[in-house]
Amino acid sequence: MSHFSYQDGVLHAEGVALPAIAAQFGTPTYVYSKAQLLQNFRGYAAPSKGRDALVCYAMKANSNLAILDILAREGAGFDIVSGGELLRVIAAGGDPGKVIFSGVGKTVAEIELALNKGILCFNVESIPELHRINEVAGRLGKRAPISLRVNPNVDPKTHPYIATGLKASKFGVAFSDALATYRTASALPHLDVVGIDCHIGSQLLDDAPLLEALDKLIELIDTLASEGIVLHHLDVGGGLGIDYGTGDNAPVPIGDYVSRVFARIDAWRAEKYEGRPIKVIFEPGRSIVGNTGVLLMSVEFLKPGEEKNFCVIDAAMNDMARPALYQAWMDVKPVTPRDGATVKYDLVGPVCESGDWLARDRELAVEPGDVLAMMAAGAYGFTMASNYNTRGRAAEVLVDGDQVHLIRQRENPADLFALETIVK
Ligand code: LLP
């Protein structure tokens, strides 16, 4: 069930009419639904109940403290990719003991921070990184729990920019090198080799590639066990897609995917792994927050052209980068639809780049001053926003039933240059 719907002809987030939010907070503004967030998270958490499993939300998708706090209180762990993200988890009341640290370029300072805060595991992506973590742990008198991100070379059938598990990818350790890398890791004195992980890409509508990758990890766990390297957790990564309204196949429902993962793991453990305990970790980002948010924007001008008609809006590529970066198709709906003839528009922002468009060739009946909602904008929206053209980042609002909470103020221009110094 979607928590964004038209009620009496007006688009609502739960019980709140979106035009009222635009009037109160201005535009562009991101609006999130708490009920949708909980529904998505519980899609993973409910079938995991009673099992040794942990949902580590990939917070790069949306790292607002209010979102992290809600998920932390639901029992979520977090997948982080920087020291900054770890500090956000802690600021939101999350448990560092449920944090896994991914990414190819962890710095010494980030590793120190993570070890001092006692994270669950480092997801290691290379041999030099293994050595770096080992050295830092030794210096601090600690042991570092590590997992290797193995690159299973499975085609995720998604956009090349967000496919990460192929041979040509910068991520992970090649499947063929994995065994040797595990041997290296287990010989290092300050590391505890505890797990294995992978992440093959994002916005996967079908779970077949995810399950194929899981099979390859299982194969490797068996090989490692036969060498005496016994792992305690299996991290299947993230990647499940959402419905962007493109009319393609619908994504596999979260619960179906999670159940299939457990069915595979149960069958394998019973048959081959001698019932050894193994914690299952999920790293979903988009499927938790994507359809939890919309981006509200206002129409500034209508600009007819010879070849194209432009609808100039007050949101831009700095607010939502996905169309410019990946040619992503994002659905745009009027919050208060008008009767009357539609015109085909390109929706463009005020930023001085031809690439500054948010939607193309959309049939809309709109007038200046109308408010539009970009749907399914909750993931990789605000977190990828920039201050290009000295544009303050959008406000963020959380709706809970009929309550509206401002969870991040709109940035002022003065905030943007506060850290700068003029040299006389
Ligand atoms: N784990 C790792 C190691 C990742 O790199 C990612 C995403 C995730 C988990 C979460 O993946 P998800 O469940 O969200 O698919 N900015 C792009 C998506 C980049 C994904 C990066 N990695 C976009 O807007 O489509």
Image (spheres, grey):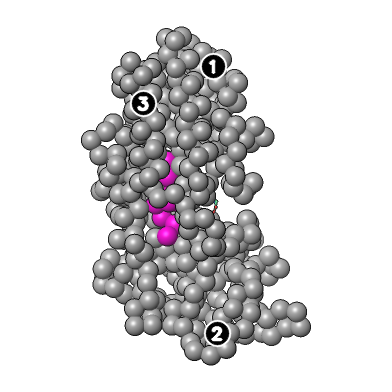
Query: Which secondary structure is most common in the magenta stretch?
Result: helix
Amino acid type at circle 2 is: Ala
- Dot 2 surroundings within 10 Å: few (below 14), some, or many (20 or more)? some
Label 2 vs label 3, nearer the camera:
3
Establish if 249 lies above or below 49: below
At 53% from the left edge and 38% from the top edge, which residue is drawn? 209
Q: Quadrant of residue 289?
A: bottom left
Residue at mark 1: 179
Stretch of the chain drawn in magenta: 283-291
Residue 33 pos. (x, y %): 34, 63
Q: Quadrant of residue 366?
A: bottom right
Nearest to the observer: residue 389 or residue 423? 389
- Is 167 one of the magenta-colored residues? no
Residue 263 pos. (x, y %): 36, 33
Q: CA distance from mark 1 to mark 3?
A: 24 Å
Residue at mark 2: 365
Amino acid type at circle 3 is: Ala
Amino acid type at circle 1 is: Leu
Instruction: Specify the label residue 314 is tagged with.
Output: none
Residue at mark 3: 267
Establish if 313 lies above or below 168: below
